[in-house]
Structure formats: structure tokens, C-alpha cells
Image (tube, helix red, strand yellow):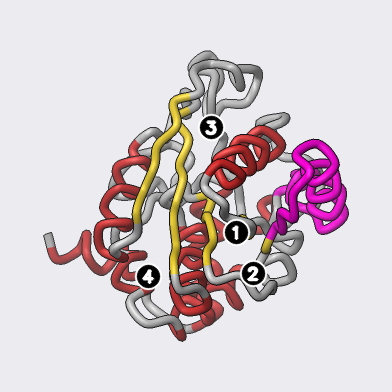
Amino acid sequence: MSNSSRCLVIFSGGQDSTTCLYWAKKNYAEVYAISFDYGQKHIIELESAKKICELAKVTHYIADIGQVLSGTSPLVNPAFEVKSVTLEEAKLSQLQDTFVPGRNILFLTLAASFAYVNKIYDIVIGVSQEDYGGYPDCRQDFIIAMEKALNLGIGDNIKIITPLINLNKKQTVEMANSLPGCMVALAYSTTCYRGVNPPCNTCHACVLRSNGFRQANIADPLLERISMN
């Protein structure tokens, strides 16, 4: 981590980005969050993002980038259904069909532009190369290359901070449990790729989240909140 006192969190309103948001609150004096409306099927994640940023008392921006990322992924194309997977299938390293090509490239580029204008030098993103669904833009080598490209293109000292890069979902849950306020916020997070509430518990994201909480022997606060309603 750098010596900067301010950071910008790329914030989806999901489990990983919520953990990163509260990690940032612990490690930075000023935290800002940016979310993207890109036509995602699980659009309710933006409502989660708003709610969690209110809980965290973090200034939150939402950028509408339209349909530029529309393609074959069921996350952005209504013609394709989100598949149900087993835990064994979810753990496979081959590329999942939910991959949205260029998503993290675009998010990091737009975040870097916002950061440059606002004199913020650290961008926090919740990518992991352990539980990553084969996504090439969640790997450490991509982050290193992207950071270099951004600095070459912007001419500034931008750093991409990845608190979860080498953590699996169990370790991410344990980190969240150690961060003040994070578990409360996770009760309002949206991970489900189908964007339903209660979560479907069968898509790739739901299966990995469920397994992480189970392995950590910690109850998922989202499911606890839903069960009390």
C-alpha cells in the first residue's frame, strides 16, 4: 500500500467490493467510491452500493456508461441465461461464460480519469486471482500491466491497490469479519448474478460466496437479514 491518505474504491455493492470499501476505511483518511451502470442484469447491485455507502458514510458516485459492454455474457445480454453451477464447476479455472470482456479495463480507466481530476492516487479494486472464474482481468499480471499503462497514459502516480488479490472466499470472509462495520454492510450486498433477492444460491457468484462463509464457519449476514424479514 502507498502512503496516500485518500483512495477511490471501484464499488459494485457486492461481497468483495464491500470488503474492500471497509478495508479502505481502515487504511485511508478519505475514501470515495465509484460504481458503474453498464446494463448489468443484476442492476440491483447499484441499490446495494448506495445503501452500503450510506452506512459507511462514504461519498458515492455512479457513472452511467450505457451499453458499451453489451455482448455474449449473460450478465449484460438478456438473450442468455445465467447458468446454475455446482461448487466443483465454480472452482474450475477455465473461463466462465459470465466474463464481460474489457470490464475491468474500462472500469479502471474511468476510475483513473476520475482520480486524476480529483487528485486521488490510489484506486482500490476487489479482484482475486484465487476465486476468479478464469477471468483474465482479475490476475496480478493484468493489474501490474494496467497500472503501468494508466501511468504511461495519464502521466501521474496512480497505484492500483488489490487487498484481495491472493485471498480465496474463506479468507475474504475472515477479513470482512475483522473490519468494523463490514459484516453489517454485507447484509445489504448483492452478489447474485441473477440479481434476485433472496439470492438464487446456484449461480457462480452465489456458490462461491456460500462456500466461503461455510468454510469460515461464519453466517452470511445477508441471509440472516432476509430470514428475519
Q: Quadrant of residue 32?
A: bottom left
Secondary structure at badge 3 equals: loop
Q: Main secondary structure of the magenta part?
A: helix
Q: Which of the two discs, 2 and 4, labels the residue nearer the N terminus?
A: 2
Q: Which of the two discs, 4 and 3, labels the residue nearer the N terminus?
A: 3
- Location of residue 52 in the rendering, given as x and y in whole percent from the top left corner: 31, 57
Q: Which residue is mark 3?
A: 82
Mark 2 residue crowding within 10 angstroms, few (<14) / some (14–19) / many (20+): many
The residue mark sitting in front, 3 or 2, is: 2
Q: Which of the two discs, 1 and 3, labels the residue nearer the N terminus?
A: 3
Q: Which of the two discs, 2 and 1, labels the residue nearer the N terminus?
A: 1
Q: CA distance from mark 1 to mark 3?
A: 28 Å
CB under 8 Å between discs 2 and 1: yes
Closer to the camera, 30 or 181?
A: 30
Mark 3 residue crowding within 10 angstroms, few (<14) / some (14–19) / many (20+): some
Residue 98 visible in the shown view: no
Q: Quadrant of the N terminus?
A: bottom right
Q: Which residue is mark 1?
A: 124
The residue mark sitting in front, 2 or 1, is: 1
Magenta residues (range): 133-160
- Residue at horizontal 56 percent and vertical 20 percent from the top: 80
Mark 4 residue crowding within 10 angstroms, few (<14) / some (14–19) / many (20+): some
Q: CA distance from mark 1 to mark 4?
A: 24 Å
CB under 8 Å between discs 4 and 3: no
